[in-house]
Image (cartoon, rainbow, N blue to C red):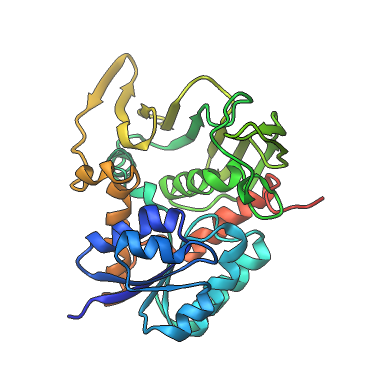
């Protein structure tokens, strides 16, 4: 079976995660990358044969089976539609789109194309999340009542000058904390619940609109540095999803509370979660086998989870099997983002 030829759109996260992940996977071969400014440089660094300035140039200039869209959110709609119109399989980064209308159009286009279409919700493949999902599916927690997916971090403290002015601090272009983590958190809650939310309420908050970059330059940010949501999943189950990047704490929590047991995973981020089950006055720490791809975390922390995502994507392409996060999952998260204010201009 010949390898699937991959073209990557976007040289930031695309170069840091998508390119090495596809290169490590036996089913794929990265043959091209597209970016308006840095494709040639990343192609040299990653030993990718072809570099282009746009998705359209890449589709016209090289034979591809798969287009992996890892460009900024404002480009997803255009690049995904172009790839689907060309009959390619597509993997798209989160957030799926800037608006629900764009996400709807992309889902409809994927259904017309009939090719495999997936969302890069790689945190489903974190070993701790896999263990929590198994406990739920096996009925060990009883009737589910509450899901929590939450992160506290330091990255957008007022004194943090690591990030300079860019699209990331532009609400119009889809930047901010809502873009960075909330699609993952909504998807994890929906995945653990086994169904999308019926209703979502919440808010975005900008505590530090005045930013200072690494060179001492100052600029204005109109994106959220905190995002907070409650969702109703029906049958007595609610979810709390939140991210606050203006704390001195680095903490990530995924918890599911049932009427029989609770399971709580906590750590600094998804790569180091410890998992505990709690029942009445009993608490046990579960032994979780590490990811078989754990050694690749030295390249990027997301690689151990992105590789099993590519396993599921390859199976979807080759066999049509379910299991990989879909464009419908992306649309569900997009609706929740919209409910808390992402994508609105008024």
Residue 329 is situated, as x and y percent measured from the top left of the image, at 49, 59
Residue 181 is situated, as x and y percent measured from the top left of the image, at 51, 43
Q: Position of 178 compared to 293: left or right?
A: right
Residue 73 vertical position relative to residue 170 in the rendered view, above or below: below
- Which residue is rendered at x = 31% and y = 76% of the image? 5
- Which residue is rendered at x = 30% and y = 29% of the image? 275
Residue 59 in view here: yes
Residue 326 vertical position relative to residue 150 in the rendered view, above or below: below
Outermost residue, right side: 346
Q: How many labels sit on residues?
A: 0
Residue 1 vertical position relative to residue 16 in the rendered view, above or below: below
Q: Quadrant of residue 32?
A: bottom left
Residue 323 in view here: no
- Which residue is rendered at x = 59% and y = 68% of the image? 77
Residue 172 is situated, as x and y percent measured from the top left of the image, at 71, 54
Residue 214 is situated, as x and y percent measured from the top left of the image, at 57, 34
- Which residue is rendered at x = 68% and y = 38% of the image? 204
Foreground: 328 or 247? 247
């Amino acid at each position: 079976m010949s390898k699937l030829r991959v073209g990557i759109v976007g040289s930031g996260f695309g170069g840091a995660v998508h390119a090495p992940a596809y290169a490590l996977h036996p089913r794929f071969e990265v043959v091209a990358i597209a970016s308006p400014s840095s494709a040639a440089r990343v192609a040299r660094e990653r030993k990718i044969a072809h570099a282009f300035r746009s998705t359209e140039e890449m589709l016209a200039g090289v034979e591809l089976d798969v287009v992996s869209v890892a460009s900024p959110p404002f480009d997803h709609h255009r690049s995904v539609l172009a790839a689907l119109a060309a009959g390619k399989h597509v993997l798209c980064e989160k957030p799926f789109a800037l608006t629900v209308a764009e996400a709807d159009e992309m889902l409809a286009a994927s259904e017309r194309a009939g090719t495999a279409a997936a969302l890069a919700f790689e945190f489903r493949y974190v070993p701790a999340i896999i263990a929590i999902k198994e406990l739920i599916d096996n009925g060990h927690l009883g009737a589910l009542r509450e899901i929590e997916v939450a992160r506290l971090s330091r990255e957008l403290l007022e004194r943090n000058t690591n990030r300079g002015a860019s699209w990331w601090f532009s609400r119009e272009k889809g930047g901010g904390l809502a873009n960075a983590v909330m699609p993952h958190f909504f998807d994890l809650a929906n995945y653990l619940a086994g169904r999308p939310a019926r209703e979502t309420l919440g808010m975005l908050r900008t505590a530090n609109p005045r930013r200072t970059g690494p060179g001492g330059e100052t600029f204005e940010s109109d994106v959220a540095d905190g995002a907070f949501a409650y969702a109703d999943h029906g049958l007595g189950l609610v979810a709390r999803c939140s991210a606050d990047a203006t704390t001195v704490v680095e903490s990530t929590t995924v918890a599911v509370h049932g009427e029989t047991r609770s399971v709580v995973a906590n750590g600094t981020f998804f790569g180091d979660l410890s998992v505990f089950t709690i029942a009445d006055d009993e608490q046990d720490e579960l032994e979780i086998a590490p990811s078989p791809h754990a050694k690749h975390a030295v390249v990027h922390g997301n690689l151990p989870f992105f590789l099993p995502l590519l396993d599921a994507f390859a199976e979807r392409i080759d066999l049509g099997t379910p299991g990989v996060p879909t464009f419908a999952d992306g649309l569900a998260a997009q609706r929740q983002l919209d409910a808390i204010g992402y994508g609105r201009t008024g």
